[in-house]
């Protein structure tokens, strides 16, 4: 599973909805921490972040890394990765492939059980049991570690470990343990609350991509 597909299928709830914790989440300490994180994100009108993802294939003993950035405003987002951009206004999604100078247009599925970039910071809110692991220092920051196990055993991954900045109540990293032996770690390098996010940022402007081929898949 490549980085983009993993990013789009790890989480399942919206950034700004009230948290609904699964009945299987019985760890009071974990729930208390996660509710604080949810309240923090819910208070934001928009957010931006730069991140790094490291993929470790334990079977092949290979490591791959990639960087990117994301801007989120409600259900709208702009995700920038090496060689591609994914832009959505909440109803339509444009995936631009730089190498082929092509943009693919899709409708955003309603009530999708898949995961969109708008939920990268709220992977814990629904469909997981949770367990508080403890605290540790990472780069002079005290983080609280929580382990999440999906209720749906058919998921491609069997657990996620997230680190939460104890002071700021924001997620600093998430490590996904895939059943195929691949571990993917997402680290947030820079996080900005309520950045300027005009709606024009969340629409694909064909004029900015001379000669782009449009593939409408709707």
Image (cartoon, helix red, strand yellow):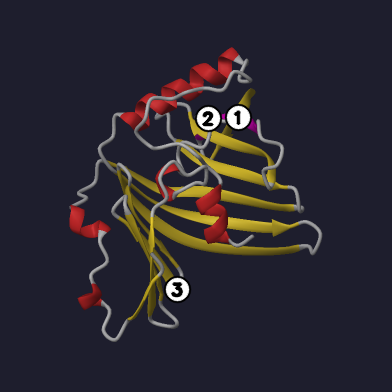
Left or right, residue 185 beside residue 75: right
Query: Is residue 147 depicted above or below 26 in this figure?
Result: below
Image coords of residue 95 (percent x, y): 40, 67
Q: Which residue was labeled with disc 1?
A: 128
- The residues bearing labels 3 and 2 have C-alpha atoms spaced at a distance of 32 Å
Cα distance in 3D space between marks 2 and 1: 6 Å
Residue positioned 52% across, 22% down in the render: 21
Query: SS class of the residue under badge 1?
Result: strand
Q: Does the magenta stretch include residue 149?
A: yes
Image quadrant where one finds the N terminus: bottom right
Specify start and end residues of the magenta stretch as a single range: 141-150
Closer to viewer: mark 3 or mark 1: 1
Q: Name the residue under label 2.
A: 126
Q: Say which residue appears at 63% left-offset and 25% top-offset.
A: 129
- Which SS class for mark 2? loop
Label total for image: 3
Labels 2 and 1 touching (C-beta < 8 A):
yes
């Amino acid at each position: 599973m490549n980085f983009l597909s993993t990013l789009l299928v790890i989480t399942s709830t919206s950034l700004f909805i009230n948290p609904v914790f699964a009945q299987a989440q019985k760890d009071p300490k974990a729930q208390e921490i996660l509710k604080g994180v949810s309240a923090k994100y819910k208070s934001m009108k928009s957010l931006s972040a730069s991140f790094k993802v490291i993929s470790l294939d334990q079977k092949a003993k290979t490591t791959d890394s990639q960087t990117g950035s994301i801007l989120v405003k409600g259900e709208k987002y702009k995700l920038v990765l090496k060689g591609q951009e994914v832009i959505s206004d909440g109803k339509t999604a444009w995936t631009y492939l730089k190498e082929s100078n092509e943009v693919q247009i899709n409708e955003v599925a309603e009530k999708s059980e898949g995961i969109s970039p708008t939920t990268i910071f709220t992977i814990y809110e629904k469909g997981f049991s949770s367990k508080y692991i403890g605290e540790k220092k990472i780069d002079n920051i005290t983080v609280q570690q929580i382990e999440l196990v999906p209720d749906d055993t058919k998921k491609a991954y069997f657990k996620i470990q997230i680190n939460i900045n104890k002071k700021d109540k924001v997620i600093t990293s998430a490590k996904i343990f895939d059943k195929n032996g691949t571990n993917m770690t997402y680290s947030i390098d820079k996080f900005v609350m309520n950045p300027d996010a005009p709606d024009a940022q969340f629409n694909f402007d064909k004029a900015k991509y001379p000669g782009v081929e449009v593939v409408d898949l709707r």
